Image: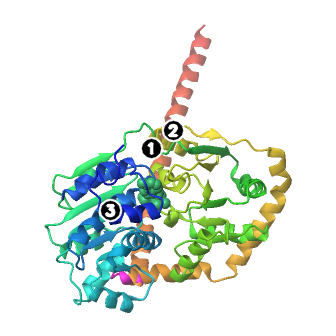
Amino acid sequence: MSDFSSLGLSDWLIKQCKQLGINKPTPVQENCMPAILEGRDCMGCAKTGSGKTAAFVLPVLQKLSGDPYGIFCLVLTPTRELAYQIAEQFRVLGKPLGLRDCIVVGGMDMVSQALELSNQPHVVVATPGRLADHIRSSNTFSMRKIQFLILDEADRLLEQGCTDFTKDLEVILGVLPTKRQTLLFSATLTDTLQDLKRLAMNKPFFWESTSETRTVEELDQRYILTPEKVKDAYLVHLIQTFTDEHDDWSIIIFTNTCKSCQILTMMLRQFDFPTISLHSMMKQKQRFANLSMFKASVYKILIATDIAARGLDIPTVQVVINHNTPGLPKTYIHRVGRTARAGRNGVSITLVTQYDIHLVHAIEEQSQTKMKEFAVEEKEVLKILTQVNVTKRECEIRLESTDFDEKKEINKRKQMILEGKDPDMEAKRKAELEKIRSQKRKFKERIQKNIEGQKRGELKRKFKSKNIKKKTKQGTD
Ligand SMILES: Nc1ncnc2c1ncn2[C@@H]1O[C@H](COP(=O)(O)OP(=O)(O)OP(=O)(O)O)[C@@H](O)[C@H]1O
């Protein structure tokens, strides 16, 4: 394996890396950094926790030191928390340069962001929506001279998922120079290859770690098969066991909705577990505060939706629990990748109900691994079942008495307004669509009934005529 200096990295950067315990390049760094330093576009696909961030931060800093100006580099990332984490890596590694960075994410003050942007920071780290808003509304900064465009978690940025970044990306790409280096990184990049044309990448250097599995070897992947009704009792039992056995462990629990995230947090707190939550219905400042407290181990348990599934690097996380089996194998790969990072060990436990078994098969097929069953004393779980279910119901009732659902509705309306849609018109349109769908459903049902009726009639007729034939035959006999 080569060292950083043989890859072309300057001494001051190697010194900075050493201070962070980064002594030898990881494979993704070893392979991608020379291509980036040569000036090529690059796509790096390597497992979670394998050092992809430094693989692009280090060459950018090296190039920046040769010709420092702002704005030199733009990094786009799907979540706000991840933007802060990437900016921190730039800041720490680029300290000797006096690096100035600017973080442009939603939920934070737009005016101060605009001011920072107009001060020509060297590096801008942004979520696409907010940056596109700045571009649309202001002409006080220019991105025309950018040398580097980096898409971290590139597949997420390019896919049309529940948050679709496509329109914002178009706005951003429209103000960038065509002559630039474009770098794409993710642990799940392979499906994204078709999108390269859109990004105008020039014969990119493509590197993918050669491994049969898509999750790291240090990760012990487990599942527990549980009826839906017993799931929360299993969760409480698991946490009790882990916290009894380990002082210095942190746990991330992933859930599929903000509401379930909130209820589970309330429930675990009732059982005195030091729990905190992270989901998109929280104010941004609270999101940052909660994440910091979790990182500092003030709280040992983080319950989060998939906004925490990608990129977050928290070395103390030893256990990831999937409270729901993720519908997409990709989501599973990123979620469980929050543990067993940078060569450390970790455990993931997925709670699987009778309805999720096909999802487990899909995950195993894509990740090329097999989950093993996690052994649990069922007797112990059943002992706490009633208490857990009653507590959860109490928490649900408490949450219903707050304006949580209302807030969700308001947030949805706000989002629509931001997207230039009229919420009332949208609601009307949705209702009309639903009406048409329901009419279609009823029509189909009627036809189905008619067909079945006809079939039944035909059968009866056949049966009758058979019987008549039989009787006449018997009569003649
Ligand atoms: N060469 C290295 N040697 C040791 N540790 C490293 C090295 N490079 C990076 N690290 C550390 O490894 C950890 C994981 O790195 P990073 O967050 O970049 O992973 P990643 O590949 O981007 O993961 P993900 O796909 O989850 O985003 C970080 O704490 C980082 O400081």
> Label 1 is placed on what type of residue?
Arg
Residue range in magenta is 418-423
Q: Is residue 356 depicted above or below 64 in this figure?
A: above
Pick the front one: 198 or 440: 198
The reply to whether residue 153 is in sight is: no
> Which mark is nearer the camera, 2 or 3?
3
Task: Count numbered badges in the picture.
Answer: 3
- Marker disc for residue 11: 3
Label 3 Cα neighbours within 10 Å, binned few <14 / some 14-19 / many ≥20: few
Q: Which of these two is toward me, 104 or 197?
A: 104
Instruction: Give the mark nearest the N terminus, 1 or 3.
Output: 3
Task: Look at mark 1 in the image and give the residue it sits on.
Answer: 214
* Label pair 2/1, CB-CB below 8 angstroms: yes
Residues at marks 1 and 3, CA–CA distance in whole angstroms: 34 Å
Residue that extends furthest to the top in the rendered view of this protein? 477
Are discs 2 and 3 less than 8 Å apart at CB? no
Q: Which residue is mark 2?
A: 369
User: In the visual, does 122 lie left or right of 275?
Assistant: left
Note whether 340 is above or below 129 in the view shown. above
